[in-house]
Each structure stands twice: as C-alpha cells, then as structure tokens.
Image (spheres, grey):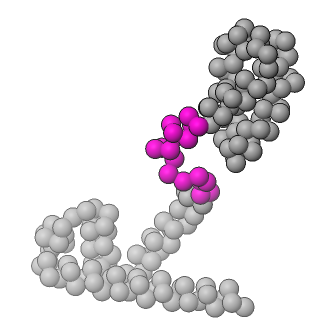
Amino acid sequence: MTFDEWTRSGLPSLLRFATVLCGSPHLAEDVVQDVAIKAQRNWARIGSADSPDAYLRRMTVNEYLSWRRKWSRYVPIAEVDSGTSPDHAEQAADHDQLLSELAKLPRRQRAVLVLRYFGGLTDNEIAETIGCTPGTVRAHASRALATLRIEFTSDRVTEDVHHAY
C-alpha cells in the first residue's frame, strides 16, 4: 500500500480516532496533520509494518501527548473566547459617543480631560497649557468626570428601561 492509498482509505478513521482522543476536532486535525507529515517522510518503514494503522494510531497518541506538553505553556485555556476579538464598528460607535459626550462639557473641562487622558499631561502641565492653577485643573477634571458619570448612568438606566419593555 502506498502513502496516497492509505490517505484515501485510512486517514478518515485516524481522524475520527484523533477527534475522540483530543476532544476537539480542530486539535485532532492539527495532530493528524503532523502525524501524516511524519508518516509520509517515513512511509517506506511504516507501510511495510504488519499493521500500518496501529502504528499510525500510536503515532497519533504520541503526537497528542507531545502537543499537550508543547502547547500547554502557550495556550492558557482550552477554548478561545469568540467575544474577545475587537468589533471595529463597536469601537467606532464608542469613539463617536465619547466625542459626543465630551462636546457637551464646557470647553475648559473638555480641554482638561483631553489633555490628561489623551495627551498624558500632568496637572502642572495642563495648568500651564490652559493658564490656570493645578487646583483649578483638578476641579475641572472632577466636575467633568462627574458630569460624564451622570450622563452615562442616565443613558444606561434609559436603555435598561427600554429593554425591560
């Protein structure tokens, strides 16, 4: 039997075996792919064995165990959380909402928040930039953040009420 013949007849059953072994069809495909690559390189020896399927099952088990050791330090969880990928439309909407909320603030308060959180300036640097004292900068920041908290809280309450009905 040639390697090509085995891939047509034996590969599907090896993949089913690996899926049960791995508990994940995706990991099973990766393990079987690695086994098939190694088997193709050594097919002269494997193909002449008494039971090539048993030999390949053993290779699959060894590869699976090797993957567990090899990837355990890189993959902290078994399943990837699909909700973690950034949604660019949501990011754009959040950006637009943030700009909209900042636009509602008085100019000095808005300038203080932008200089602090986007510009990374200290209170002294902001005070120098807008021509006031550091205490006034802190007061503007405090009032602006309080205003934004009230706006966001009332928006969330309104959304919760709409979702309840």
Residue 6 location, quadrant: top right
| Nearer to us in this view, 26 or 86 | 26
In magenta stretch: residue 28: no
Q: Image height check: is 165 above or below 128?
A: below
Which residue is drawn at the image coordinates 68% and 44% (left, top)?
22
Q: Does residue 16 appear to the left or right of 74 in the view shown?
A: right
Give the percent coordinates (x, y) of residue 26.
Answer: 69, 42
Tell whether 67 sits left or right of 56. left
| Picture layout, residue 69 above or below residue 86 | above
- Residue 44, compared with residue 142, is above or below; it is above
Asked whether 123 or 17 is in front, the reply is 17
The answer to whether residue 115 is left or right of residue 8 is left
In the image, the segment drawn in magenta is 65-82
Return the x and y of residue 7 as percentages of the image width and height: 81, 22
Question: What residue lies at 50% left-to-right and 37% top-to-bottom?
Answer: 70
Image-quadrant location for residue 148 = bottom left
Residue at 82% over, 11% down: 2
